[in-house]
Amino acid sequence: MRKTNWPTGAVMLAAAFAMAGCTPQSDLQQLNQNQFTLRGMIASDRQQIDALKAQIARQNDTIEELKHGAAGAGPEASALNDKVAKLETEVSALQAGMAATPGLVVPPAGDSAGPAPGAAAPGAPSGPGPAAAAMPAETAPTWPGELDQEIAAAQGSSEPGIKMYRQGLDAMKAGKYPLAVANFTRLQHSYPKSALSEPAEYFAANALYETGEFDKAILQFNDLVMRFPKGKYASAALLREAQAFLKLNDRIDARLTLQKLVADHGGTPEATAANGMMKDLASD
């Protein structure tokens, strides 16, 4: 598993942004690219952590079942005990790998119930600082109004993949977010060059956000802005991405995303909201 010292990297990146005013335009573009790459690495690591925690939970469940079976297994107990020992070794190895990730609370062996109350969420920074600080007020999402516009526009469209797109929009409207993501993802895979690819990714990212899958939503919003930096949904995607980082108590990347939003899309309603959020973050 790739190890990343992302808090240090994010601080260094913030310092680089502070000096961006005296660097050439090409350097500023490189800083922006590095920022997005770093965010993608962070979100990817969090997904790997979640997968490892799920694997540990399954292994612990298996261990408990084997221990229970070994208690009355008679002559077969030795073989079962060997299996238990092997599984416990695997769990220890998984926990050792997870412990190397900064900010991660690793559950003890045999505990498959998840983090204890008050424990840090997977990938969240440790310590009382960011987690205890007040969260900026969340700006209402704009996607519901944009969704209605897209539903109306899609009625007379003959764009390739329009059927899947309409199904995704309808599912989104009905609050069936996993179904919406499935349809939008299928559209993007089947018609990657379609004009519908941009809005499909935007609505899919919002659907992931609404289901609480903030890591995945960040990856989607990040990818959308990289592919369509001047697109229709770029400013809204950056604002929503910053909000997703805040949901994960990642205030450093939230602030960096808001700074990029203001720098690249000044004068937009999203930039106005971003300025207010940055003031709230600075006052904590």
Image (spheres, rainbow, N blue to C red):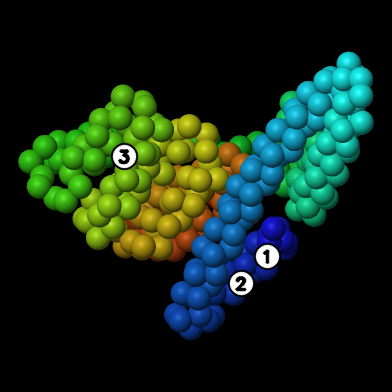
Query: Few, some or many C-alpha atoms within 10 Å of disc 2 (few <14, some 14-19, many ≥20)?
Result: some
Q: Which residue is mark 2?
A: 16
The residue lying at 53 percent from left, 41 percent from top is: 214
Amino acid type of disc 1?
Gly
What is the quadrant of the C terminus in the image? Answer: top right
Q: CA distance from mark 3 to mark 2?
A: 40 Å
Position in image of residue 279 (x %, y %): 56, 48
Disc 1 secondary structure class: helix
Which mark is nearer the camera, 3 or 2? 3
The residue lying at 24 percent from left, 41 percent from top is: 165
Contact check, label 2 and label 1, Cβ < 8 Å: no
Q: Is residue 232 visible?
A: no
Which of pointers 3 and 2 lies earlier in the amino acid sequence? 2
Which mark is nearer the camera, 3 or 1? 3
Camera-nearest residue between 222 and 239: 222
Q: Which residue is mark 3?
A: 183
Position in image of residue 164 (x %, y %): 24, 40
**Horizontally, is 128 left or right of 158 in the view?**
right
Q: Which residue is mark 1?
A: 9
